[in-house]
């Protein structure tokens, strides 16, 4: 599904060169469950942004499903993201004025899905995710775990092939965090390729493949 060939990402901070990623080579097969771990500033989130086409490498190549996506323009990248890639973030990124169900339906709206079909699809996933009784509540009326469930439902409503999760349990208590990672693992068992960035060793150790970063490089891939 994913091939990175000698990928580097360089930023300039105060006139100084910072190599956030330094010659990364990586292959990800469909259906894998991977955790990416390492200290702050090691390049984990930069890698996730590149994989999600939110950023471009300074050098190297990125192949997604066999297609070179290294130099796509913003419109092309957005089209692939909406169809192929789902995102889950630590801070949920829900729209405050919209209900849980309306937040979940947003990708369908952007894809031009008719309103009746949007409601059918969102109602099904809301039931599956245990959110039916909270579907009309705004984000501020939901617990952290419920907000993250809404965010995950929104991320997978378009049935992407790849789900990228950046510290998905980082803003939750231990019980809610376990519930969320269990939900993500269930989606992986159904065939979704799952890549999770985490500082939590216990969460990271649950993945089938564990990649450790240090100073922009992969130092272990087991």
Image (spheres, rainbow, N blue to C red):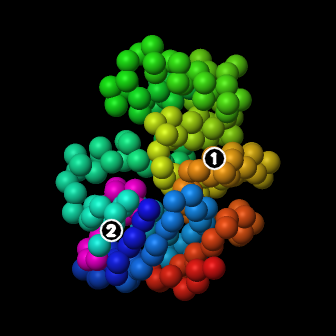
**Residue at 54% in and 86% down:** 219
Left-right relation of 72 to 140: left
Task: Look at 57% across and 69% down and name the residue there.
Answer: 36
For the record, the magenta segment spans 50-60
Callout 1: SS: loop
- Residue located at (70% from left, 19% from top): 133
Residue 46's x, y, as percent?
42, 67
Residue 143 in view of the camera: yes
Residue 22 position within the rendered picture, expressed as x and y whole percent measured from the top left = 38, 83
Expressed as whole percent of the image width and height from the top left, the position of residue 8 reads 33, 78
Instruction: Determine the residue positioned at 51% across, 30% down.
Output: 104
- Disc 1 target residue: 190
Label 2, on which residue? 62
3D distance between C-alphas at marks 2 and 1: 26 Å
Q: State whether the magenta stretch is mostly helix, strand or loop.
A: loop
Q: Is mark 2 on a helix, strand or loop?
A: strand
Q: Does the magenta stretch include residue 45?
A: no
Is the residue marked by circle 2 packed among few (<14), some (14-19), or many (20+) residues within 10 Å? many
Q: Is residue 89 visible?
A: no
In the figure, 174 relative to 145: above or below? Answer: below
Nearer the observer, 175 or 209: 209
Instruction: Tell me, for residue 33, which label it has, or none.
Output: none
Residue lying farthest to the top in this orientation: 116
Mark 2 or mark 1, earlier in chain: 2
């Amino acid at each position: 599904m994913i091939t990175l060939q000698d990928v580097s990402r360089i930023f300039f901070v105060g006139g100084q060169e910072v190599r956030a990623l330094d010659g990364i080579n990586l292959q990800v097969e469909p259906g894998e469950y991977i955790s990416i771990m390492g200290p702050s500033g090691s390049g984990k989130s930069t890698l996730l942004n590149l994989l999600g086409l939110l950023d471009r490498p300074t050098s190297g190549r990125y192949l997604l499903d066999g297609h070179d996506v290294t130099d796509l323009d913003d419109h092309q990248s957005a089209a692939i993201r909406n169809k192929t890639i789902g995102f889950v973030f630590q801070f949920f990124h829900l729209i405050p004025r919209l209900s849980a169900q309306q937040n979940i339906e947003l990708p369908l709206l952007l894809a031009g899905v008719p309103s009746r079909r949007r409601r059918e699809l969102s109602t099904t996933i809301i039931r599956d995710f245990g959110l039916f009784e909270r579907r009309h509540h705004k984000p501020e009326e939901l617990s952290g775990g419920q907000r993250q469930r809404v965010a995950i439902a929104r991320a997978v409503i378009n049935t992407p092939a790849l789900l990228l999760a950046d510290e998905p349990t980082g803003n939750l208590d231990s019980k809610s965090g376990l519930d969320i990672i269990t939900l993500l693992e269930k989606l992986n068992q159904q065939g979704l390729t799952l890549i999770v960035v985490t500082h939590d060793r216990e969460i990271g150790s649950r993945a089938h493949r564990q990649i450790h970063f240090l100073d922009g490089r992969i130092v272990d891939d087991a």
